[in-house]
Image (cartoon, grey):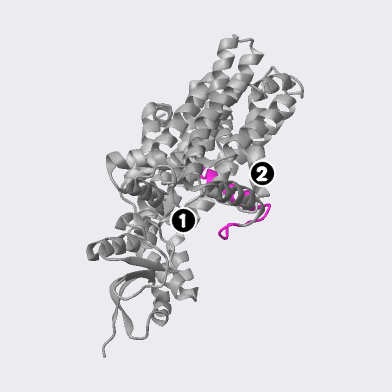
Amino acid sequence: MQARPLLHAIERFLLSPFSLVLAIVIAFVLNAYSLPLTDVDEGAFSEATREMMARGNLISPTLNDAPRHDKPILIYWAQAVSVSVLGVSEIGFRLPSIIASILWLVFLYRFCLRHADRRTAQVASLVMALSLAVGFIAKAAISDALLNLFIALSMFGIYDFFCACRDGKSPQQIRRLLFFAYAMLGLGFLTKGPVAVMFPLLISGIFFVSAGAWRDWLKAAFFWPGWLLFLVIVVPWHVLVYLDQGDAFFRGFYLKHNLNRYSNTFEGHGGKWYYYLVVLPFVLMPFTGWLLAIAGKLLKKLRSVPLGVSSGEGLMERYLILWFVVVFGFFSFSGTQLPHYLLYGCTPVFILLACYRPEFERRWLAYVPLIAFALLLAALPEVLVFAAAKAGKPYEKTLLDGLVAAFSDEARWLLPLLAVAVIALALWRTLPVWQGLVIAGLLQALVVAAVIAPRVIGVTQGPIREAAKVARDNGGTVVAWRIIMPSFSVYRQSATPTRIPVEGELVLTRTDRQHEVQKLIAPNLVLREVYQRSFVTLARVEPGKP
């Protein structure tokens, strides 16, 4: 009898605004203000923004004084606004991603309110906030949270347009929805280029044709006032960047970082057609088993709606499933593959999970992937010890030894405690499955943000932040040799070119490559260490003893 009030209390908590606020604080905010920027991506975006502000040129990003053509301008502008208020700091560069992720969640909630109910909206928002990959990009100083926001908003607007046409809404309402969708396409394009337009157009085209509403899709696709709004958003900066640097950005971004990135492997991020089958369970963790548990229901619902019919139940499910499948299939055959690409198609998964939340059925199928993941985390300290003993390269050995030391404290019992908690939730048979998994999601997010991330990032990035501060205090010219850590330039607040150092300069390099620098400088010069920790060495080039 005592268990029933406890179950009611858990349900009330999970369906209350407080649980959403708690999930946001843990997954999106906790330690975002203190952990060092990570390399390469966070450091590169942040340094490009810092250099733009330092040069007074808000049109053409550079990285260590070299043109940076990886992304369009919107993320740099967002970071510049934040940094101008909060200063050159971790939270200054990360705040745009945090805000974008919160807005992404808010609009997901509102979409579910329009097309489902408040309970579904609450659960979908919790699932989104607590999914492992969302927690990573929400507090990362990169463009992906912003891009996911605009892709989600454009896709929501397109489905609202479909429903408005189907339900006979007024022309004014339909035009407003189209203007909204085109504005989101423009902002997405200004964030990461053609991918923000390609997916909404392709997915919506397939869906409208499948629903027998292809005339409505043509009306939307050839809505010239919408394209005019899109051009008003996108074109001005493209004109300015062309006037500033000619066609360099167009060749670097549209040819190299779009066409060539899809057809070729970039920066070692290649994969196989099954890459995202392996990645998906980790992206959605702890809700991977939840998806497996409802897969049969989704397929049954999908088959229940005949093609060519634009009304009835199951159309939203078709739209959401198409959204995910198209993104998944597109990137599965890309020459360059990264885990966070899959997030462009995960917003519909969060909604589907909420719509088909399991109560008591298929409990072990829902929990087994999470239990396996929790046990893997519990064994992490021992795995690191084993890996460190097997490491052959000095660089890998140094990093792994640092991680072994970092996880030799209370993490050795905190990580197994998560596994115990997850198993206990699985064994609590009167607790609805979806509620147990959301609670597990809160615990997982807390462990990742407060236990794992500080230790991993402290070992891999802490020495870079310290070395940058030492270099800044010492002054003078600093160069880098065979080490790509743009966050060093952020913390030093000065660009760091890559070249062979000369007398009087400081050089940043990996400790195992220090001997290479010694061989390259003049015979009468030596390296005097100014800072050395883990894999990082900062040394000054000085005359040797006569």
Whether 304 is drawn above or below 526: the answer is above
Q: Nearer the viewer, residue 341 or 376?
A: 341
Q: Is residue 276 magenta?
A: yes
> Which residues are drawn in magenta?
266-286
- Label 2 SS: helix
Where does the image place residue 2, in percent across and percent down from the top left? 39, 30
Where does the image place residue 359, in percent across and percent down from the top left? 55, 31
Quadrant where the N terminus is found in the figure: top left
Residue tagged 2: 330
The local crowd at label 1, few if under 14, some if 14 to 19, many if 20 or more residues have their Cα within 10 Å, is: many
Residue extending farthest to the bottom is 546
Instruction: Tell me what residue is drawn at x 39 percent, y 42 percent.
Output: 58
Where does the image place residue 86, in percent across and percent down from the top left? 28, 41
- Horizontal side of 114 relative to 516 (left or right) equals right
Residue extending farthest to the right is 307
Task: Using the numbered discs, state the Cα–Cα distance from disc 1 to disc 2 in whole angstroms.
Answer: 31 Å
Q: Nearer the viewer, residue 536 or 394?
A: 536
- Label 1 SS: helix
Residue tagged 1: 377
First in residue order: circle 1 vs circle 2: 2
Where does the image place residue 204, in percent across and percent down from the top left? 66, 29
